[in-house]
Amino acid sequence: MLRIDNITKSFENELGEVKNVFNGLNLNIEQGDFISIIGSNGAGKSTLLDTITGNITPDSGKINIDGKDITDMPKHKRGSFISKVYQNPSVGTAPSMTVFENLSMADNKGKTFGFSLGLNKKRKEYYRSLLKELGLGIENQMDTEVKSLSGGQRQCLALIMATLNKPKVLLLDEHTAALDPKTSKIIMNKTREIVEKNGISTLMITHNLQDAINYGNRLIMLHNGEILLDVKGKEKSELTPEKLLKVFNREEIKIKDSELFSA
C-alpha cells in the first residue's frame, strides 16, 4: 500500500557539516498496518514522517502509495489522503474557530466550495456523537473556541479531525506525549478503535515502549536511519520494554533510559 524504496536524505548545518539521516531506507507498509515506531533521538523517526507528508523531499529514492509515485507530489495534494496528528495539541486545529467550525473545516478538506457553505448544521449532531464517545465533555462545547479547551481536549479534537474523512495514511508524531496518563490512554484507545475500524494504514512515533508494544500490529525500531527491528504478530505481543532495550544494547547504542521512557 505504502512503499518506501531506497530513500536517502542528508542535511547540512550552519557549519557546513553534513549529517546523513537515511542511506537507502526501505519500508513496505501493508493496508491496515498500525506500526509503532521507536528509536533514540536523531534516529530519523520524524524525518520519515515528514518525507511521507512531503514536508521533506528525499535526495534520492521513491515513495509510492497504491502503486502511484508521490515522491515529487506537492504537500498540499498529499493532504487529501494523508493526515497527521502532532505532539503539540495546538497544531492541527484553528484556535480562534469553534469546535464545530474546526470539524466542518476537516470534513470539507479537499472540497472546492467555500467554507461558509461547508457549515452544514445537519452534520453537527454527527460530530457531537463522535465527540461524546471520548467522554471528555467536548460534545457540549461545539460553539466554544478551540483555544478555550484543555490540551487533552484539543488533542482529542485533532485526532477526530485527522480521521474524519478516513485518510489512506495516518501519521502520529508522539500525539500523546504532552498529555496526562488518563487522557493519553483515552486517546490511545480511541486511536486504535478508529484505525482498526476503518483499516487506516498508520505510523505512530512514540517514546513510550509499553504503548509501542500494546498498540498496533507491528513495531519497528530505528537508529541512525536504519531499521534495527521489524516485528509483528505473536513476536510483537511477546515483547517487553526490557527486551527492546536489550536490542539497543546488542547494537552498542549508548542511550539513556529517559530517552525511551517519557513521562
Image (cartoon, grey):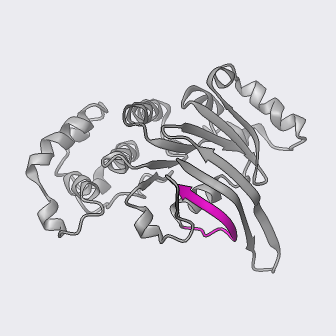
Q: Residue furthest front?
A: 67
Near-viewer residue (77 or 41): 77
Q: What residue lies at 37% left-to-right and 36% top-to-bottom?
A: 198
Q: With respect to residue 167, does 219 lie above or below?
A: above
Q: With respect to residue 78, does 11 lie above or below?
A: below
Near-viewer residue (173 or 72): 72
Residue 120 position within the rendered picture, expressed as x and y whole percent measured from the top left: 11, 54
- In terms of image quadrants, where is residue 104? bottom left
Residue 81 position within the rendered picture, expressed as x and y whole percent measured from the top left: 40, 56
Q: With respect to residue 176, does 83 lie above or below?
A: below
Is residue 56 located in the magenta-colored stretch of the structure?
A: yes
Q: How many numbered marks does the figure carry?
A: 0
Residue 139 position within the rendered picture, expressed as x and y whole percent measured from the top left: 21, 39
Q: Give the magenta-colored segment's residue range.
A: 55-65
Say whether residue 140 is visible: no
Q: What residue lies at 12% left-to-right and 64% top-to-bottom?
A: 117
- In terms of image quadrants, where is residue 195? top left
Left or right of 237: which side holds 111? left
Q: What residue lies at 26% left-to-right and 38% top-to-bottom?
A: 131
Quadrant into which the C terminus falls: top right
- In terms of image quadrants, where is residue 190? top left
Left or right of 132: which side holds 173? right
Residue 261 position within the rendered picture, expressed as x and y whole percent measured from the top left: 67, 36
Near-viewer residue (148 or 119): 119
Is residue 11 located in the magenta-colored stretch of the structure?
A: no
Left or right of 124: which side holds 252? right
Say whether residue 241 is visible: yes
Q: With respect to residue 114, does 174 lie above or below?
A: above
